[in-house]
Amino acid sequence: MGSLDAEKLSKKKASLKAKPKSVAPKAAATPTKYKKKKGQKNTTRKAKNENGNDEVQAPSASASASEQLSFFLNEFQSANGIQLSSLELESIKESCILELSRSLDQDSKSLGMHMKAAFGSLWKEVLTEGQLLEGKIDPGSPAVLIISSSALRSIELLKGLRSLTKECHAVKLFSKHMKVEEQVSLLKNRVNFAGGTPSRIKKLIDIEALGLSRLSVIVLDMHTDVKGYSLFTLPQVRDEFWDLYKTYFHHRLLQRDLRISLYGPIPNGNEFKGRRKNLEE
């Protein structure tokens, strides 16, 4: 009997020692669940990236004027391989950026409403009337100039202005199916809106057919095409745009005679923060 009791006591001690081992896997369960959550978040971000640029970008309306200006100046310096002086950066204020209504989409159909809001109580006088006024309204000098990466996109945006261009038609400024002579003829009248591609716009300014005396806003189309290219990324068009900007617009921006509207999707806030920091350095 003594040997049987000893055997039972030995088994009881063994079972007590084994119990802590049975709870060990439960303790490891918490970090395992946490890792799965992290994995799910990463998968979501990856899926967004694979869907294209629009999925990882936010509308420019969600960015402040300061963020938009930082983005624009960073693009300017990067594309041209230059560094603006601190004096130049101080001269370019946030007021140079035309902040658009956050309650409206930034598509071709909404462009007219955005422009009406931008000009306030003067919108009808500045944007719709068709008569030349000697000493005040020069021929061929638009109040708003829309710059796009292609002729088709220019046409699409100009269609969104139809409600404002019944008396004074918008002028198309691109080379596709349009001769310079035809555009020169159209620019001999009053022009409130004009839109086109950088190369043709610059050529018409060079020959003094397109005037800048009334120019108040340039709308830079940030829309991306089916291949993901935009005004700032399509190689040849990008170079032509910055050539146009440096030649005719940058000094007006410094003098605060011009406002820029970044129309459409642009990089999100996280990218803005990094770019802004680089500019301030």
Image (cartoon, rainbow, N blue to C red):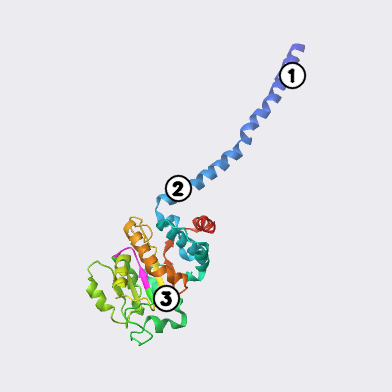
| Rendered location of residue 161, percent (x, y) | 35, 75
Q: Tell me the residue that label 3 is attached to.
A: 216
Residue 1 visible here: no
**Residue carrying label 1:** 9
Q: Amino acid at mark 2?
A: Lys
Among the 4 quarters of the image, the one containing residue 182: bottom left
Mark 2 or mark 1, which is nearer to you?
Answer: 2
Residue at the far bottom in the pictured view: 134
Q: Quadrant of residue 57?
A: bottom left
Q: Secondary structure at mark 2?
A: helix
In percent of the image, x 33 and y 60: which residue is there? 237
Mark 2 crowd level (few <14, some 14–19, many ≥20, 10 Å Cα):
few
Q: Which residues are magenta?
A: 145-150
**Closer to the camera: disc 2 or disc 3?**
3
Q: Which SS class for mark 3?
A: loop
Q: Dividing the image into 4 quarters, which one contains the C terminus?
A: bottom right
Q: Secondary structure at mark 1?
A: helix
Q: Which residue corresponds to the image point at 39% horizontal and 53% vertical from the top-left?
A: 52
Residue 190 % position (x, y): 32, 82
Is 169 above or below relative to 4? below
Q: Amino acid at mark 1?
A: Leu
Asked whether 146 falls inside the magenta stretch, the response is yes
- In the rendered view, tell whether residue 24 sits above or below residue 106: above
Q: Earlier in the sequence, mark 1 or mark 3?
A: 1
Residue to which mark 2 is pinned: 46
- Give whichever of 131, 22 is nearer the camera: 131
